[in-house]
Structure formats: C-alpha cells, structure tokens
Amino acid sequence: MRISEKAYAKLNLSLDVSAPRNDGYHDMVMVMQSISLCDELDFTLDNSGRVSATSNFRYIPNDERNLAVKAVNKYLDRIGRRDVGCRINIIKNIPSGAGMGGGSSDAAAALRAMNRAFDNCLSGDELLELAAQTGSDVPFCVRGGTQLAKGRGEILTDLPDMPMCSLAICKPSFSISTPELFRKLDNIRIRTHPDTPGMLAAVNAGDLSGMCRRMYNVFEDIDDRRMRTVAEIKSKLLDMGACGAMMTGTGSAVFGVFNESKDAVKAAELLNREYGFGRSAEPTGRTEI
Ligand code: C5P
C-alpha cells in the first residue's frame, strides 16, 4: 500500500520562553502558523518489519534520527503491528536548521499517513499523544493552521485562521542548533517579551496589522553574529514593504508578512539571490484528522 502526505512548514508569529524546567525543557508560549511551503512524503507499507527513509538530500538521516521514521515506529508499536514495515520517501523543500519545523512536520505527516493506512484506528487525541513523544513541535504540525501552543508545545488551542496575506521567507546559509540556542537563552536576562495577549486579541479580531506589530521572538535578544544577520534580513524585509518581520523558532529563517503577493514574491527572489534561500508562501488552514 502507498500513501502520500504533504508536510507543511511552520512559522512562529510570536515566541516566548520561561525559565528552564526540571526536565531540561522550557515552558513556552507561541502563536504558530502553518504555511504552504511543504515537504512531500510517500509511505510504502510492506511486511518487512523495518522502517527506513530516503530523500532527495544526502544529509537527511534514514534511521530513528529522522523524526518521520521515529513517528512511524511509535505508531506501529502503539497499535501492536511490528510485523509491518514502511519505506518513506521524502522530497525535502523545507530547509533544515531553519526553525520551520521541517523534521517535526514530516513526523506529523507520518502519523497522519499511518492512521489513514490503519483506518483511523487511533483517535485524534491518541495521535497527538504520540506526536508529543516524537518532538515538541510535532503536535502543532499534526493539524497546523493557526494555534496557540503552550508547555513544551503540546498544549494547543485553535485560533481563527490568519487573515489573507503573503509571506517571504529567507534562510541565511548558516543553521542554528535548537539546544544550543536554548542554552544561550538561559544565560541572558530576556529584556523584551512578546505581547502575547495583544497578539491573541489581534488574531481573534482578524487584524493583520495588529498581529504584525506584535510579532516577536525572544531568541532574537541573543547577542551574537548570527542574530546580527537575522536583524539585517528583517530590516531588508521591512524596507521591501513587509508590515512585520521576525525570526521563526530558533532560526535561522526569517520571514516577512506582506499584504500583496507580488511584493512577497519579489522580496523572496531578491533574498534568494543574496542569502541562498528565499521563498514566498501563504498561510494554510488546519487539516482535520
Ligand atoms: O523536543 P525536541 O526534540 O524538539 O527538542 C529539542 C531540544 O530543544 C530539547 O532537547 C531542548 O534542549 C530544547 N527544547 C526546550 N524546551 C522546549 C522545546 C525544546 O528546552 N519547549
């Protein structure tokens, strides 16, 4: 049996982090948004009992380090079908080390695909539980759309769809390691926190410019060379007409929100030439599971 699934990238429209917890994680408050830029996954089920992945990029791991493999293994364990094997082929369009949830979204797509293959034998809540065990951003990616995420990212609340707009996303050539940036954040005093209540009020009112004014990511406070490049890309996006710009997750990708799609396309083309990765995209709505 063969199943195809799209794995949509995510952006953070705001990101706040609290003090570290005893389990090594941090409590977070994030407004998250899925976007049309996506990986394309194919799942071929067989009776080998083995799960593996291939992809169009050599650096994508083919074993448990690949979150899609991890998710399929968790699903098969959960339903007691270790006799089943699965070959996953991933066409990667979402850059890695970008804060765009590429690996997490592949894992979420894997959980949706497996549940389709096994006649939705797990409920939505059971799928979300497996998602939380796979990675912090995976629960959001299972359904996507616009959601508020708290805790490690597993406490989710649906929000109204983001108002119509276009996005330009740029990833500079360097990637950022998530655990490394969390460690750095623990060593600074965060000066500015996003206005999450204001952001939520703007999302609920469908007020795009109110949202743009409140877009903020605490990781941008870290003072290093990479954040200076992030700030440079942000100011270029704003100069090109974006009504708001911020870094997503732990970076290194930065995005701008535009009213007009032609402006987002133009900005993405320019940033693609300058930094090596620039794409335009649109927000996407939730996938029902
Ligand atoms: O859960 P995930 O594997 O995606 O997390 C990667 C790393 O990011 C964790 O090992 C931890 O260092 C950091 N993290 C955190 N707090 C979160 C999410 C991730 O400290 N809420």
Image: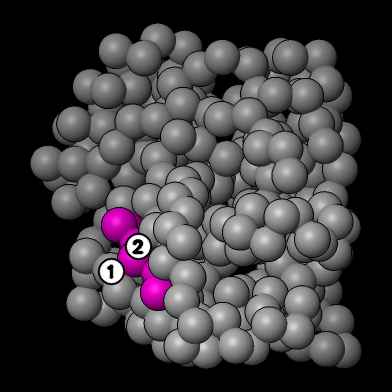
Q: Is residue 255 magenta?
A: no
Residue that label 2 marks? 90
Which is more toward the observer, 136 or 113?
Answer: 113
- Expressed as whole percent of the image width and height from the top left, the position of residue 182 reads 62, 76
Q: What is the magenta range?
A: 87-92
* Horizontal side, residue 120 vs residue 278: left or right: right
**Residue 18 falls left or right of residue 218:** right
Total of numbered circles in the picture?
A: 2
Q: Tell me the quadrant of the picture where the C terminus can be found.
A: top right
Cα distance in 3D space between marks 1 and 2: 5 Å
Query: Measured from the top left, where is residue 250 in percent x and y?
Result: 53, 63
Figure quadrant of residue 209:
top right
Decide which of 134, 32 is in the foreground and name it. 134
Give, as a three-letter code, the residue at label 2.
Ile
Q: Residue at x 64, y 53 (%)?
A: 116
| Figure check: 177 above or below 10 | below
Q: Secondary structure at mark 1?
A: strand
Q: Quadrant of residue 91?
A: bottom left
The mark found on residue 55 in the picture is 1
Labels 1 & 2 near each other (Cβ < 8 A):
yes
